[in-house]
Amino acid sequence: MIRGIKRHSLYFAWMIALIATIGSLYASQILNIKPCVFCWYQRVFMFPLAIILGVAAYKKDKKIFSYVIALPIIGAMIAFVQTIFSYLNITSLVCGLDCSGSGQKLFGFLDMSIASFFAFSGIVFFLIVAKKKK
């Protein structure tokens, strides 16, 4: 099983990026949830990952790590800051939207910023696994 995870780690990273991208677009375009400034910055770092990781997974490019690792790390840091600001209730000072409202929660209980942080962290994890694959 671990060998299978190592072998398909680029595909897993790509799937996380693809699901996060589609979910983000669904939330803003279908559910009409207006993205805040933090959400836009996270999208800047997530959307290219859906394309770049898809190509890397298709080509089985093991060298992608050095080119792409900065994107999910910076995205995770932005999501982490947004989560902290949300829990300290100071998001209105920075972005002007209430990110802690019930309409901004995934499945009714999970903040989108936390979900974004987990998505970026998962991508980092699978990229590290792909790099260490022998």
Image (spheres, helix red, strand yellow):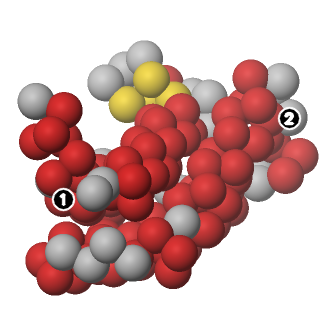
Residue 30 visible to the viewer:
no
Q: Quadrant of residue 63?
A: bottom left
Q: Nearer the viewer, mark 2 or mark 1?
A: 1
Coordinates of residue 80 in the picture (x, y in percent): 68, 40
Image spot of residue 83 (x, y percent): 68, 34
Q: How many marks?
A: 2
Residue at mark 2: 90
Label 1 secondary element: helix
Residue at left offset 15%, top offset 53%:
8
* Three-letter residue code for mark 2: Ile
Report the front residue among 66 and 94: 66
Specify whether 114 is left or right of 81: left
The crowd level at tag 2 (other Cα within 10 Å; few <14, some 14-19, many 20+) is some
Q: Could you classify mark 1 by the number of other residues whose Cα lies within 10 Å: few (under 14), some (14-19), or many (20 or more)?
A: many
Q: In this figure, which residue is indicated by the disc labeled 1?
A: 11
95 or 18, which is in the foreground?
A: 18
The CA distance from mark 2 to mark 1 is 37 Å
Amino acid type, label 1? Tyr
Q: Residue at x 37, y 20 (%)?
A: 108
Q: State which tag comes first along the sequence, 2 or 1.
A: 1
Looking at the image, residue 43 sits to the left or right of residue 80; the answer is: left
Q: Quadrant of residue 50?
A: bottom left
Vertical side of 14 occupied by 128: above or below: above
Residue 46, given in percent of the width and then of the height, sits at: 45, 65
Q: Is residue 35 above or below residue 48?
A: above
Q: Quadrant of the C terminus?
A: bottom left
Q: Quadrant of the N terminus?
A: top left
Q: Residue at x 76, y 42 (%)?
A: 81
Q: Secondary structure at mark 2?
A: loop
Q: Nearer the viewer, residue 40 or 130?
A: 130
